[in-house]
Image (tube, coloured by chain):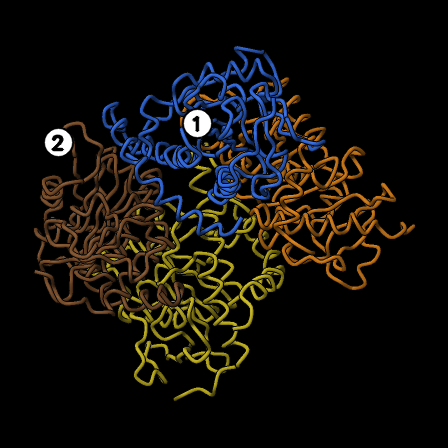
Chain colours: A brown, B yellow, C blue, D orange
Amino acid sequence: MKPPAADPALLEKLVLANRVLYRYGVVDGFGHVSARHNASSAHFLLSRNMAPALVRREDIVTFDLDGAALDAEGRRVYLERFIHAEIYRARPDVQAVVHSHSPSVIPFGVTGQTLRPVFHMSGFLGEGSALFEIRDVAGDTDMLISNNALGAALATSLGSRSTVLMRGHGSTTVGTSLEQAVYRALYAEVNARLQIQAKSLGEVTYLNAQEAAKAAAINDTQLPRVWELWRQEIGQV
Amino acid sequence: MKPPAADPALLEKLVLANRVLYRYGVVDGFGHVSARHNASSAHFLLSRNMAPALVRREDIVTFDLDGAALDAEGRRVYLERFIHAEIYRARPDVQAVVHSHSPSVIPFGVTGQTLRPVFHMSGFLGEGSALFEIRDVAGDTDMLISNNALGAALATSLGSRSTVLMRGHGSTTVGTSLEQAVYRALYAEVNARLQIQAKSLGEVTYLNAQEAAKAAAINDTQLPRVWELWRQEIGQV
Amino acid sequence: MKPPAADPALLEKLVLANRVLYRYGVVDGFGHVSARHNASSAHFLLSRNMAPALVRREDIVTFDLDGAALDAEGRRVYLERFIHAEIYRARPDVQAVVHSHSPSVIPFGVTGQTLRPVFHMSGFLGEGSALFEIRDVAGDTDMLISNNALGAALATSLGSRSTVLMRGHGSTTVGTSLEQAVYRALYAEVNARLQIQAKSLGEVTYLNAQEAAKAAAINDTQLPRVWELWRQEIGQV
Amino acid sequence: MKPPAADPALLEKLVLANRVLYRYGVVDGFGHVSARHNASSAHFLLSRNMAPALVRREDIVTFDLDGAALDAEGRRVYLERFIHAEIYRARPDVQAVVHSHSPSVIPFGVTGQTLRPVFHMSGFLGEGSALFEIRDVAGDTDMLISNNALGAALATSLGSRSTVLMRGHGSTTVGTSLEQAVYRALYAEVNARLQIQAKSLGEVTYLNAQEAAKAAAINDTQLPRVWELWRQEIGQV
């Protein structure tokens, strides 16, 4: 059943999210961000197959939790929409999903290292990043999450965490709002860069579980500040 | 008691300082810079809670040394204004304070390494950076300097130095003028990057105490040069 | 025998390729990109001797597979046109060639390390990069591929691979289309940066041969997405 | 004796050199570039004390080889003009001098490592960089080359090389033309970055003396290409 039209403010926010992720180097010509539909928890909003930097409101397509497009009208859709579909199915708390090849995060996945919070800005990494090894599930593949089974396996790896590394591919970050998911995707990248440098200097003291949880909670109260910056930097969308 | 209106030139300089710190990546959506009030040493000037890049003159709020806002008029203020308040209280010589999560500095705090002057531009690091470990003072926290006791503890760690690293958080740099504090915050970041690279190459010869003190003194005479550059790069504020 | 005039769409694409490679730091004032002539497999198109960022349609010159210019009309041509000529001669499948000093790739050539695919975006590196040591062929030279013999030796080193590192010089990447060659040159650079970081973190799991081949095949279907981004970023050429 | 007015084309080129060095991060608010006077080998042209990015033609001052300004007319001059003066005195072949704190070069000076040519673009480093230790000459100083004796000592360290590292300070690069000196200052920085990365990957094969000399000679014939790029990027000065 097709849900009602999405809230125009959510669509605008989703376009802005695409542009912000590009501006800050989390995505390049590839990667995508989605939001759960405001009027139907069984649907989500995601651009048609195109570079995030170019997404406009009219490029947003509605998908169900099987990854089927409801209103693509012949337009190409992302091969990896199943990342989003299966995470929304597995995680009712999740309202937004970012999938990227964010550069500094890649070295962690391919070496089996865990992203841990170097500073309070990445308290959301308190449980550490999860790691998805597609070989364990499907042998030698093209590395893409191109069907529901792979999406479900990825969602299982993610578990209750905020971020899952995908070996030889990239990472996926979730949030309880678009603002939070974009923030987390960006600071996962920043944290990764800092973690690489810190490890080169010596033994790293990460935030412990209590510090991470408390920092994540207080930082969420500051999201409007940074969202307002990004809105002004991107301008009218 | 409320001090008289601040010098418009100081307010303009403070707005410029916010923009410069953003332009050069010392702050992002977070971090803040303050100046002691020109007409009252018991007050300081700091933006309301917002991204530094967007600060305008009318966003500057006056605070007393307890961190209480005198003219916020309902506007949200920074959770960590106590960093500024308690440093101004403890250090009569300090006229400006920059708090940031400047990226290359973070790895030093979390590994317990000391910032030392790699080159004459960072002679102000001659005594080395101080290190503040919030766990020693308050156990497991959200990492923020969100009250006077934490601010006072941070000021104690800073001591007579120019820069204090805050483990798992960021750093704070002080100066005897806004120009000097901004300069120091920026070159602390540059020095950190160089120090990481130099350590990867071999044993580092840092400036010794005499060299650092002399270099810091002569560099202060060159501040107008770089401030003029920044003023022109930022344009009218 | 001079071939007919080249397809204007190909010329436009070649100009765009020059600009994209500059925008993304694959080339600087140096480096060059060519395309095989659309109407004659025995000819190729390459700018006159100039910085890639400034190339316009009227700067494109036609060359034969000996590296002789057909319509230079007195304009200076690149010293290293033989890279292109000899690869087009040796590799009938190749439709485009990028030669650059792309920074992160250089450290691999000078240490005899092999570029391997860290992530699916660089599946084209599945066979690993080839390595060309000019000393083995010609002793102590100016390092440039400035004649047919050197070009042929380079093409022999390249073999059937997508990328050949040139020790103390740079690298050359080929594709079956301009879009693919530009994509590969850019992601060879990205992959090199990631590979350096990953090696500093621990043992790296690269894509295996099957994964790399499958990833390369599926990624080729996504080239229009990123080419459209680049077209819009560069604007009218 | 005051020399005749300098060639306007040289003045324009010197302004452009200032801007290029800033655009490419060789200088920031600090650092300077000079040219020997076209009509008098006993004089040189150097901006008054200001940020290189802001230099205009009317800011250029004429100096003699003692570092005395002939036409400063009360304007502040650089503290380190003696770098230029004494190198022009010691090296009749030198027509231009760049002094900078170019970031990636700093780690070499402070660890006593030598810059060596990683690729053909830096053949001018074939003899390796020289190293100047100011402590050996003057004990504990402010690190600056603020008089003729220090300038002469620096020139002695430089010897017949193209580049001298200054421990805890920066570096100085010379050329037989402004174009060449700017090119060398920029590629010394690029080479330094590559050399750090290459050393982290394994044993580095540098260009040998013959390769470096030949590469430097052929690259000099390509300077107009990159200068034209820079001229167009900077625009009217």
The residue furthest front is: C4
Picture quadrant of residue A230: bottom left
Q: Where A71 falls versus C180 (above or below)?
A: below
Q: Image check: A208 left or right of D127?
A: left
Visible residue check, residue D107: no
Q: Image check: D164 left or right of A16?
A: right
Query: Three-letter amino acid code at disc 1?
Result: Val
Residue D77 place in picture, x, y as percent = 73, 56
Q: Where A198 falls versus B76 (above or below)?
A: above
The residue furthest right is: D1
Q: Residues within 10 Å of mark 2 (few under 14, many from 20)?
A: few
Residue B73 place in picture, x, y as percent = 33, 85
Mark in front: 2 vs 1: 1
Picture quadrant of residue A124: bottom left
Q: Which residue is mark 1?
A: C174
Q: Residues within 10 Å of mark 1 (few under 14, many from 20)?
A: many
Labels 2 and 1 in the same subunit: no
Residue A138 marker = 2
Visible residue check, residue A28: yes
- Chain identity of mark 2: A
Q: Secondary structure at mark 1?
A: strand
What distance separates the C-alpha of mark 2 from that of mark 1?
31 Å
Q: Where B142 falls versus C43 (above or below)?
A: below
Q: Image check: A135 left or right of B1?
A: left
- Chain identity of mark 1: C
Residue B219 marker = none
Q: Image check: A223 left or right of D171?
A: left
Q: Where D155 falls versus B94 (above or below)?
A: above
Residue D228 place in picture, x, y as percent = 66, 43
Query: Three-letter amino acid code at disc 2?
Result: Ala
